[in-house]
Image (tube, coloured by chain):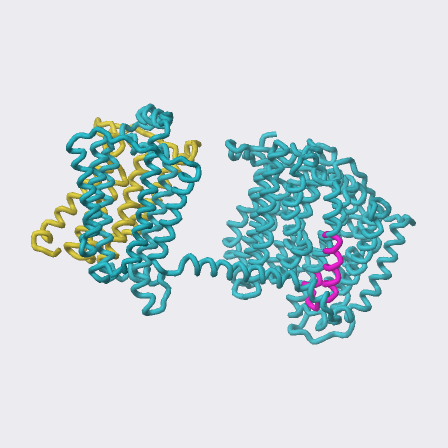
Chain colours: A yellow, B cyan
Amino acid sequence: MKTLIFRTIAPFLAALMVLFSVFVTLRGHNEPGGGFIGGLIAASAFAIHGIAAGVHSVRRTLYFRPLSLAAFGLMLAGLSGLLSILFRVPFLTGLWAFPEIFGVELALSTPMFFDIGVYFVVLGALASIALTLEE
Amino acid sequence: MVLDFSDYTFWALAAPFAAAAIAPVAKKYLGHNAAWLLALVPAAIFLHLWNYILPVSNGTPVVLATDWIPLYNVKFSIFIDGLSLLFALLISGIGTLIILYAGGYLKGHADQGRFLSFLFLFMGSMLGVVLADNLITLFIYWELTSITSFLLIGFNHKLEASRRAAIQALVVTGGGGLALLAGFILMAHTGGSWEMSELLGNRDILKDSPIYTAILLLVLGGAFTKSAQFPFHFWLPNAMEAPTPVSAYLHSATMVKAGVYLLMRVNPILGDTVLWSTILPIFGGLTLLIGTWMALRQRDLKLVLAFTTVASLGLLVMLVGTSNEKAITGAVMYLFAHALFKGGLFMIVGTIDHEAGTRDLTRLGGLRKLMPISFITAILAALSMGGLWPMIGFIAKEEVYAGIFGTSPHFIAITAVAVLGNAMMFAAGFLVAVRPFFGHERTTPKKAHEGPMLLIAGPIVLSSLGLITMIFGGFTAHSLLAPMASSVAGVQAHVKIGFGLHFNTALALSAVTVVLGLVFYKGADKIRNAKGYLIEFLGKGPDKGFDYVIAGLVRGAAGVTRVLQNGNMESYLTFTFLITAAAILLPLIGWNELPTMPQIPALHFYEWGVLGLALVGLIAILIAKDRLTAIVSLGIQGFAVALIFMLFGAPDLSFTQFMVETLSVVIIALVMTRLSLKEHDPRPLYQFLLDALVAVAIGGGMALLLISVTQVPFDPSLSNFFTENSRLIAHGRNIVNVIIVDFRGLDTLGEIAVVMITGLAVVALIRGTRHAYRKNVDPLDDMMNNEGADK
C-alpha cells in the first residue's frame, strides 16, 4: 500500500476530497448531495490519508478527536432544532433567513445547520472507527 | 381563570425551585444561619396561600390554568379547594419549620447546602402534587416527589443502608407511579377530561364505566405504594436512614400522605362502591394493626415513630374506604392533627439524637431536667397522638369513632380494629415522649443538654398548635377542616371543635382505648422481646421479599443475557438473519401473499451490462480463493447496484451507495487484518451448506418482499406532497435532502445519534479488547486514557 506514488498523492487527494465534501454538503439542498454523503466522503479522505501517512499524522491534522467532532455535530443538529423554541414553533421546524451580504443574498436556515451536524456526526463516527482500526 | 406569570400563585409554585438553586450559595456565605433567610420562602408561600382561605371556605374553589402542551390537551393547571388548600398550607407551614430545623440539625455538615436544596426541590414537587388540577401535571409532580425523596433518603450516600433504602423507596413508589399513570390515562379517557376539577363534576361516569375495576386498581397501586400500605409498607421504616428533618417532613407530614390525598381526592368519583369499601378498609386496617404492633417492638425512637406513621396512614385509608361523610370528617381531622403531632415528635427525637448522641429507647432516661422544653413539647405532642383531652387529637379521635360506629355493615370489625390500633398508637406515643425523659439519668454518648433555637422552634410551634387550634376551634373547624371534609366527601360536611365533652359511645370507646393503651404501655418491653414466626414474617417479610424480587430480576436478566449474548459472533449473525428471514417469509407464505413472477423487463444493453456486472461480483465472492478477494468482489456487486440507482434516476442514493461500498470494503478489510484470520475459509462442508441456507433464506426473502411491494398499487399521496412542498415550504429542490433534514428531521436526529453511539461502541470494543483483557481494567476508562495518549 505504501508506494511512493500513493504516499505522495494521498495528502493532496485527501485535501481535495475534504474540500469536495464541504461543497457536496452545502449544495445538498438543491442538487444531489447533503450532509450524509459529504460526511462519508470526508471520512474516506481521512481513511486514505491514514493508510498513506499513518494514523498519528491524521490525528495531528484533525486536531480534534474524531468522536468529539461527532459529538459536536450531534449537538449542532439538536441545537438547530431547539432554535425553534425562541419562535414558539414545534421542535425542528425549519427557520429561514435571507440576509444580504455584499449584495449577495445568502440563504441561512436551521436545516442547513442540521445538515452540517449530520456531516460532522458521520465524519467523526466513521473516521474514528477507521482510524482505530488502522492503528 | 387564566394562570399567567403575573399571578403570585404561579410564583408560589416556582419559588421552592428557585430557593433550591440559591440554597447552596446562601449556605456558603451565611453558614447554617442561611436557614433563617431561606425559611422566608416557604413562609411567604404560606402567607400567600392563606389568602385563599376566605374564598375557599365560602365554597368557591379556584381554578387557574395555562396551556402547556396544547396538542395533547395537557395544561398546567391548579385547583385550589378545601382539600388541596389545607395540604398546601401544611406543606408550606411545616416546610418553614423544617428548613429552620435542618439549619440547626446539619450545622457544620459539609453538604448542608445540597441538603437544603433537595428539601426545597421536594417542597416544590409536593406543593405541585396537591395543587395540580391536570392529571399529567399531577403525575409529573408525583414522580418528582419520588425522585426528590430518593435523593433525600440517599443523602448519606456513603452508607450502604442509605443507598439500599433510597433505591427501595424509588422502586416501590416509582413502580406505583407507573400504575398511577395508566390509571390516570384510563380516567381521562373514560371521563373525557384531563382536569380533576372537571372529572369531579361528573360523579358517576367513572363508577358506571366497564373499566372501573381497572381504573380503581391502578389508582390504588399508586396510592398504596406512596402511602406505605401493607404489603408495600416496608420502604417507609427503611427510609428512616435519611437525616431526621427528612423523616419529619417527607415521611410523616407530607409525602407519604400523597397517597391518602389522592384517595381523598378521587373519593367522590371512584369511592362508595363495593370494591372500594372492601379493599380500602381491609388493607388500611391490616396496615394499622401491623404498623402499631411493629412500632411497639422497636428500640430506635425514629423507627417507633416510622411504624406509627405507617399505622396512621392505614387508619386514614380505612376511614376513607368507608366513604361515609362522618368517618371522612374524622379522617380529615385526624390527618390534620397527625401532621402536627407527628412532625413535632420526629423533630424532638431528632433533637434528642443530636444532643444525647443516641436514640435507642433502652439507653435513654431522665432527660426531663436536661431538656425541659423538649420534654414539655414531647408530652403535648404525645397527648395529641394518644387522643387525650384537651388536644386536637382528642377531637379527631372522637370524630373517628363517632364516624365509624354503627354506620357500615361491618362496623364492629372496623371499630375493633380502630380501637386496638389506637390503643397501641397511644402506647407508642408515650413510649417516645415519656421513656427518654423519666426514670434515672443514663450515661449517653454525648452529655445531653437542651437543643438550640433552630432545633426546638419547630417542635414548640407544632406541639402548641395542637392546643391553639383547639382554642380557635371555630376558625379551625369552619375555615380549614370543614371545606376539606366537604371536598373529600363530596357533600357539605359539618365540623365542630370545642372543649366540651359529650357523653356518648365515642367517649366510651375512647376510654376503652386509653385503658388498653395503658396495658400495652406496661407490656411494651415484653412485646419488644416477644418472638414468633408470624411476628417476624409480618415485620420483615415484605422487606425480604423485595430483595428476593430484585435478586430474581438480576438473575433472570443474567440468564437471558447468557443465552442471547454468548460471545460468539457467528451465532449472533445466524440468529439475527434467521429471525429476520422468518419474519419476512412466514407472513408471505402463511397469508398466501407470495408475489406473482414478474415479467422480464425490456432493458437497454448497458442496463443488462450493469446487471451482469453485479452477477460477476456475486459469483466471484463464491469462488474466491481468499478472503480479501471475496471482500473486493462484494464491493463490485455493490458498485453495480449504485450504477443501477444512477441509471434509474436516483443520483443521491447512487452517490451514497458508492461511498458506503467503498468505506465498507476498507473497514471490513481493516477488520480482517486485525482479526489475523487464516487466509482461506476453514469451514467444513456441512457448516458451509448451513450458512448458505441462511444466506439464501434471507436474500430470497428480501427479494420476494421487494417484488411483492412493487406489485401492490402505489399510493402517491406522500411523494406528491413532498414534490409539491419541497420547494414551497422547505426552499429546497433536492427532495431527498429536504426529507432528510426537514420533513423527517426528527428521524434523522435519531439516526445520527445511533451513528454516534455506534462509533463510540466500536472504538470501545476495539480498544477494550486490546488493552482491557490484558490489564484487567475498565474498557471505557482505558479508551479515554488512550484517546488522550494518542494525541
Q: Position of residue B431 (x, y in %)?
A: 76, 65
Q: Residue at x 81, y 68 (%)?
A: B523
Q: Position of residue B443 (x, y in %)?
A: 69, 76
Q: Position of residue B497 (x, y in %)?
A: 82, 45
**Would you identify the image quadrant in which residue B209 lies?**
top right
The dominant secondary structure in magenta is helix
Q: Is residue B319 left or right of residue B656?
A: right
Q: Is residue B575 left or right of residue B99?
A: left
Please say if B334 is above or below A79: below
Of A20 and B244, the residue lying toward us: A20
Asked whether residue B358 appears in the rendered view, the answer is: yes
Q: Is residue A105 left or right of residue B352?
A: left
Quarter of the figure with the N terminus of chain A: bottom left
Asked whether residue B450 appears in the rendered view, the answer is: no
**Would you identify the image quadrant in which residue B352 lies?**
bottom right
Q: Position of residue B580 (x, y in %)?
A: 38, 46
Of B478 and B615, the residue lying toward us: B615
- Spot the residue most to the right: B503
Specify whether residue B298 is painted magenta. Answer: yes
Specify whether residue B480 is painted magenta. Answer: no
Residue extent of the magenta highlight:
B283-305
